[in-house]
Image (cartoon, rainbow, N blue to C red):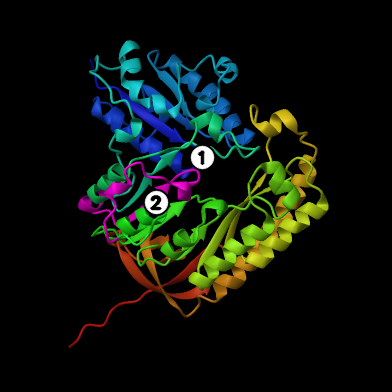
């Protein structure tokens, strides 16, 4: 049997990107070769997102296009995994994709080699692991890695499909997480991003593995402290925390030396009425109190957030409360989404999607304009400063990477700088990037 080839397309969040790295390792382990184009592949696998309808619509469009490739390659297997498959409890989505051969939730990736063997694409394989998180990923970067510490969610925000798509919150053992990160450090990784739907609600069933001198009782803060002690890891980031789990200890851990000077803390709305309807479990004042405590502990920290505009029943007054909260917090960046009804969610069942598409677009643009106004003002303050940049790419003589505040920085340089920390003096501030020059250390003569 000739070597089968595969092509993966990943949609959505960092968790999906991390899952795709495990799928790559799984397929490589059974002898398959990754190719860069769908028309070269015997297996096209789409790792789907379900956060908005537009994300699922892209899957339908892609499948229709890929099905035409079977004229040239009759043995082509088309597969869909991720949140779209995970939330399809009644098979309604599956029935809309007759050209798809394999349609399975993320956790079932462990059975993918067996299914491919049954379809004749690869040789018969042995027993599979039970937990897909036990699969060592094939990382996309040699210096940066995503590390899931939990899967699923038990919060049941009314707009969200995650509990249906990924199940209830399940936390990994601290020993497994720390072993993975120490192994990453041994491979030369210098930055890790911890992933979880409400990452700071992390609870370790094996908390006895934490060091006796660990100062924290909060398990997430304790985990951060342990990772800070891993030699070789120089930057730690995590996403996405929940405001109700930002305890004093978690806030204190933001000041640990290896943590980036940035926190992404979703708020979704500045209106108490909307927060209640969304089942977010905190009030506007409680969120603002968390922000005040964070800024008190880490002055100058950069802050990001998620916001939904046009949720069911959102009035103009409620939207303006979100606008005022955005200005009060003075976020560095906001990921703004127009509400999209998702079948199977509490909001789909209980509320009416009564804000027009036109009005959603108007609110989105208004808030986006405010965001750009604020970020431009903030970025101008970096001109003349030197920031530490972890270089991620270099094309046509321009290197790109993030500062500790997760600001994108560009400067002239070569590919030999990829994966290195470079001090860059900022000379120009744009809305979504800082431009500068690498600072060359003078050697003693």
Which label sits on residue 12? 1
Mark 1 or 2, which is nearer the eye? 2
The boundaries of the magenta stretch are 184-213
Q: Are marks 1 and 2 in contact (CB under 8 Å)?
A: no
Frontmost residue, 386 versus 415:
386
Q: What's the distance in space between the residues labelled 1 and 2, CA to CA? A: 28 Å
Frontmost residue, 261 versus 189:
261
Dot 2 falls on a residue whose secondary structure is: helix
Frontmost residue, 198 versus 365:
198
Q: Is residue 90 left or right of residue 74?
A: right
Pointer 2: what residue?
A: 219
Which residue ends up furthest to the bottom in the rendered image? 445
Q: Is residue 402 above or below residue 160?
A: below
Residue at 70% in and 57% down: 367
Badge 2, how many Cα within 10 Å: few under 14, some, many 20+? Answer: many
Q: Is residue 434 above or below residue 315?
A: below
Q: Quadrant of the N terminus?
A: top left
Badge 1, how many Cα within 10 Å: few under 14, some, many 20+? Answer: some
Q: Quadrant of the C terminus?
A: bottom left
Look at the image and say whether residue 195 sits in the magenta stretch: yes
| Residue 418, image quadrant | bottom left
Does residue 445 appear anywhere in the picture?
Answer: yes
Percent across and percent down for residue 341 are 68, 34
Indicate which disc, 1 or 2, sits on the residue closer to the N terminus: 1
Residue at 34% in and 35% down: 133
Frontmost residue, 231 versus 275:
275
Q: Is residue 239 left or right of residue 21?
A: right
Percent across and percent down for residue 269 are 68, 52
């Amino acid at each position: 049997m000739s070597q089968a080839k595969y092509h993966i397309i990943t949609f959505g969040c960092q968790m999906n990107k991390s899952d795709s790295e495990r799928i790559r390792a799984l397929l490589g382990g059974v002898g398959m070769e990754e190719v860069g184009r769908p028309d070269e592949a015997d297996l096209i696998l789409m790792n789907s997102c379900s956060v908005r309808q537009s994300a699922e619509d892209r899957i339908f469009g892609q499948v229709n296009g890929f099905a035409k490739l079977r004229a040239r390659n009759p043995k082509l297997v088309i597969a869909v995994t991720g949140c779209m498959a995970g939330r399809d409890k009644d098979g309604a989505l599956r029935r809309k994709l007759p050209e798809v051969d394999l349609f399975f939730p993320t956790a079932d990736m462990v059975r993918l080699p067996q299914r491919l063997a049954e379809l004749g694409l690869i040789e018969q394989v042995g027993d599979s692991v039970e937990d897909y998180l036990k699969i060592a990923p094939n990382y996309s970067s040699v210096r940066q890695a995503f590390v899931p510490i939990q899967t699923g969610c038990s919060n049941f925000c009314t707009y969200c499909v995650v509990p249906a798509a990924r199940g209830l919150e399940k936390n990994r053992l601290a020993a497994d997480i720390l072993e993975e990160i120490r192994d990453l450090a041994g491979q030369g990784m210098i930055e890790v991003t911890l992933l979880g739907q409400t990452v700071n609600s992390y609870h370790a069933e094996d908390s006895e593995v934490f060091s006796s001198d660990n100062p924290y009782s909060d398990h997430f803060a304790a985990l951060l402290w342990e990772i800070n002690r891993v030699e070789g890891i120089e930057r730690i980031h995590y996403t996405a925390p929940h405001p109700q789990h930002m305890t004093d200890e978690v806030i204190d851990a933001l000041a640990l030396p290896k943590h980036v000077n940035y926190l992404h803390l979703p708020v979704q709305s500045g209106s108490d009425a909307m927060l209640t309807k969304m089942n977010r479990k905190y009030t506007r004042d409680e969120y603002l109190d968390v922000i005040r405590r964070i800024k008190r502990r880490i002055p100058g920290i950069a802050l990001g957030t998620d916001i939904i505009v046009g949720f069911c029943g959102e009035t103009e007054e409620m939207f303006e409360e979100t606008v005022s909260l955005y200005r009060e917090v003075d976020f560095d960046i906001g990921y703004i989404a127009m509400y999209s009804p998702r079948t199977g969610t509490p909001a789909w069942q209980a509320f009416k999607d009564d804000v027009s598409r036109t009005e959603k677009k108007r609110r989105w643009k208004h808030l986006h304009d405010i965001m750009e106004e604020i970020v431009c003002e903030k970025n101008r303050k970096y001109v003349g400063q030197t920031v530490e940049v972890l270089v991620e790419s270099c094309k046509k003589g321009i290197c790109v990477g993030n500062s500790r505040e997760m600001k994108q920085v560009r400067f002239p340089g070569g590919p030999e700088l990829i994966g290195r920390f470079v001090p860059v003096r900022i000379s120009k501030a744009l809305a979504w990037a800082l431009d500068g020059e690498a600072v060359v250390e003078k050697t003693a003569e």
